[in-house]
Amino acid sequence: MGKKLYITTAIPYVNGTPHIGNALDYLLGDIWTRYQKQNGKEVRFQVGTDEHGNKIAAKAAESGLDPQAFTDKMYINFENLMKKMGAEYTDFIRTTDIHHKAAVQYIWQKLQPYIYKGKYEGWYCIGHEAFFTDKEVEATGGVCPDHQKPYERVSEENYYLKASAFSDQIREAITTGRMQIVPDFRKNEFLELIKDGLPDVSISRPKKTLTWGVPVPDDPEQIMYVWLDALSNYITVIGYPDKQEWKDYWPADVQVVGKDILRFHAGIWPAMLLGLDLPLPKKLLVHGFVNVGGAKMSKSVGNVVDPNEIIDTYGVDVFRYYFSRHIPTLDDGDFTWEKLENAYNNELGNDLGNLVSRVASMVTRYQSGVIGEAPTGEHDMGPYRQAMEQLHFNRAVDEVWVMVRSLNQYLESVKPWEIAKKREDPEAEQHLTEVLGHAVNTLLQISDLLRPFMPTVAETIHKTFDSGVIVPIEAEGGLFPKIYNHTENPRAPKPQAS
Ligand SMILES: [Zn+2]
């Protein structure tokens, strides 16, 4: 039996409510998980929340709660979103879990040969909870582009991880593909960033500036830096170091991260793993940001889109469809309510939904609902599988749509309704059976390919055709009843000119 598969997602801070970026992490992890399971693999799929650090302590204080009570309340929003998205995760870790905190202290001790104490002076972004180099600060005019806050000059006594000791090994792992960074342009960006080597990183803060975190063992004056604590979750959640099962899953097959945190996952994290004498993850899937109508989503602009609202209005599979197909898996993408609604009404409603109901009703009308024998379709699944293996999920859905469109064109050209008129002729009868049988087989295949993306819709299509007899779709208006909340209804009566 091969190694069990393991996929991870970045753990978000619980200082706010979940946003589209979190939902995208969960979705990408879930698509991969479902695809692998469909192929008979056993998959462990981690998600969770990052609950330490100053930002959380500050938010807790604002709401008049102690940090633990605050995080106990806030993490539920993330768990609820996971459930709502239908994500089949196996583990939900909170960095305030007792096992995690003990494991991180063990990790600290095991990293001792690579930890030293030193004075640190540098440019710090409180939003990132991270230091930035002079070069980066200069390039951005002294203001963090992600947080719109000026970097602060900070000087303090910290513990350091000697990440520089691992520069060559990490570079080699990335270049040879032992630790693959997908897509290539992100890999190249990162290699460029570390061409002079990895800098050592501060991994603790004095207790006077950071109170809410895992204490440094044997030094009551220092608290662990949130990144060391958070990154460790990927192994502590599977039981590192005390539960043997972690060895069945590590190294992770895929780690899903946003482009803004690649530097931590391709630099500090591998350095920690090498320091612990553990293998590196096989792949980092780096996704981009979701913009709204070409603009960066931001609270101050007021264009933040709540994933819950999309799911509540259009349904979870529609959310999954849009974000897997119309947001490129490995690059930035764009969302607008109009785009979503057009994709819903046209691609899902007209292309797929009508196709399903059309085929079902023809089999019902011409063959009393009994699906006849037909040769199985000869569709080339190569491009779909290749896209899935290369983590270009959007291209895989495009491939499914090639099948959807070509089946529509096939029916338009063969015209089963014309053949049905000549059914006294046994040859025509036979031809009709074959045409509809082919259509049904193709739809069953489409439903299988859609399973990782739209599990509920896929199951409905499957049920409609799989038993040999048509099972009508119960939902009123079919699979995708038209919605015109943000676009014009072409059938709406035109306002009268007066
Ligand atoms: Zn920042």
Image (tube, rainbow, N blue to C red):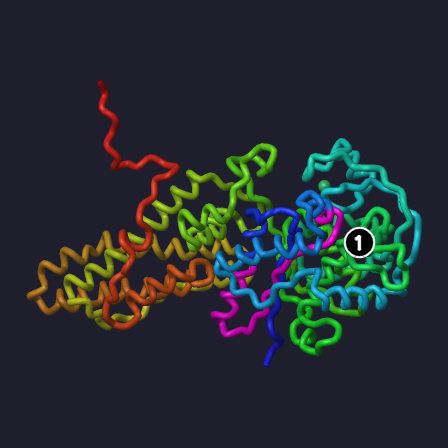
Give the residue displayed 70% in from the left and 67% down from the top.
235
Q: Mark 1 is on which residue type?
A: Tyr
Viewer-proximal residue among 176 and 253: 253
Q: Quadrant of the C terminus?
A: top left
* Few, some or many residues within 10 Å of mark 1 (<14, 14–19, 20+): many
Query: In front here: 44 or 282?
Result: 44
Q: Residue at x 13, y 68 (%)?
A: 427
Q: Secondary structure at mark 1?
A: loop
- In the displayed structure image, the side of residue 144 where residue 295 appears, left or right: left
As drawn, is 269 to the left or to the right of 248? right
Q: For the magenta stretch, what is the residue range?
A: 28-57
Q: Residue at x 14, y 56 (%)?
A: 418
Q: Residue at x 65, y 61 (%)?
A: 283
Q: Provide residue 175's location: percent of width, then percent of height.
A: 72, 58
> Which percent across, then down, holds residue 276?
80, 68
Is 46 magenta? The answer is: yes
Name of the residue lying farthest toward the bottom: 1
Q: Where is ligand 1, by quadrant?
A: top right
Residue placed furthest toward the top: 498
Q: Position of residue 27 (x, y in %)?
A: 53, 56
Q: Position of residue 24 (x, y in %)?
A: 55, 52
Which residue is label 1 attached to? 225
> Residue 45 falls in which quadrant of the image?
bottom right
